[in-house]
Amino acid sequence: MPLISVIMGVYNSDPVKLTAAVNSVLNQSVGDIELIIYNDGSDNVTGKILKGFTDRRVKIICSTENKGLAVALNACIDAAEGKYIARQDDDDISLEGRFEKQVKYLEEHKDIDFIGTACELYSDSEGVYGERIMPEHIDRESFLFNSPFIHGSMMFRREVFRCHRYRTLGKNRKYEDYDLFMRLCADGYKSANLTDKLYCFYYDKALRAVSFSMRCDEYKVRMECFRMLGLMPKGIIYALKPILLGFIPRRATMKIKEKTNKV
């Protein structure tokens, strides 16, 4: 049984970014891992890239149709054998020492069930251009303004997924991680963040436009989960945040995110 199962969903991935993401996992100081990649109905280019990974720690699950990230991650979790289960996005980079430091923290803090890290931000045009230092200590109110985690940096104890999975409801598209984190918190699971920057998150500001339908989906996720967390009625105005931001010029919303250290 490997120490860590790393789960990744891919769909028509950028070949260079995908290769870098996989190598960043395989080159971690903790070598006792398995990397489970779910090919979610991608084109032949992505399939060819995946076939090129010859490391025995890489396991590929293939789907002939695109089912969505939540389905992909759940399939990876079902196949995982590790003591810990870590997320990794196909266009991000796990920096040196990520897994080692996360495992060490979880081994030393038995009360913590899942943990994230701070991150660097990078884009194609600017390279590494910023950082996000997430709150070290998490409580229910940490979820009001935005997710307090960099989703791709997360590591969970295996036991977390005995009763929980990513939800595949339509409203959760793009928000499956935020939804999961809030449900876990509502059920009493404890979490934290390392302040070390151990993850490099691909965040191209030019590609971050959010449609109105997606804003409505986020509103629905927030309303449901804020109720679970006991954050009402205070949470109502925060639940409306994504819709209200839709009426503000995009340049102004980017400034707000920079000021509030949010992505």
Image (cartoon, rainbow, N blue to C red):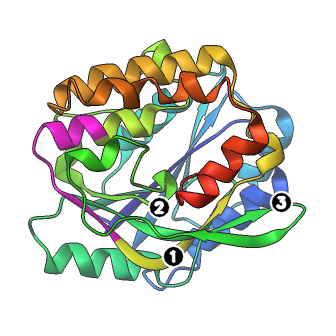
The amino acid at mark 1 is Leu
What residue does disc 3 label? 16
The amino acid at mark 3 is Val
| Residue 144 is covered by the magenta coloring | no
Viewer-proximal residue among 50 and 28: 28
What residue does disc 2 label? 153
Which residue is at 60% across, 51% downward? 257
Q: Is label 1 in contact with label 3 (beta carbons under 8 Å)?
A: no
**Does residue 235 sit above or below 131 in this rendering?**
above
What residue does disc 1 label? 198
Which comes sooner in the sequence, label 2 or label 1? Answer: 2
The amino acid at mark 2 is Ser
**Does residue 113 sit above or below 182 in this rendering?**
below
How far from the left and from the top, in percent, is residue 65? 66, 19
Q: Is residue 226 visible?
A: yes
* 148 sits to left or right of 107: right
Quadrant of the image occupied by residue 21 = bottom right
Q: Is label 2 in contact with label 1 (beta carbons under 8 Å)?
A: yes
Which comes sooner in the sequence, label 1 or label 3? Answer: 3
Q: Give the Cα distance between marks 3 and 2.
A: 20 Å
Q: Is residue 54 visible?
A: no
How far from the left and from the top, in percent, is residue 228? 18, 27
Which residue is at 73% across, 40% downward? 208
Would you call the spot at circle 2 few (<14 residues within 10 Å), some (14-19), or many (20 or more)?
A: many
> Which span of residues is magenta-colored?
182-193
Which residue is at 29% across, 75% downward? 103
| Residue 190 is covered by the magenta coloring | yes
Viewer-proximal residue among 256 and 66: 256
Would you call the spot at circle 1 few (<14 residues within 10 Å), some (14-19), or many (20 or more)?
A: many
Q: Quadrant of the N terminus?
A: bottom left
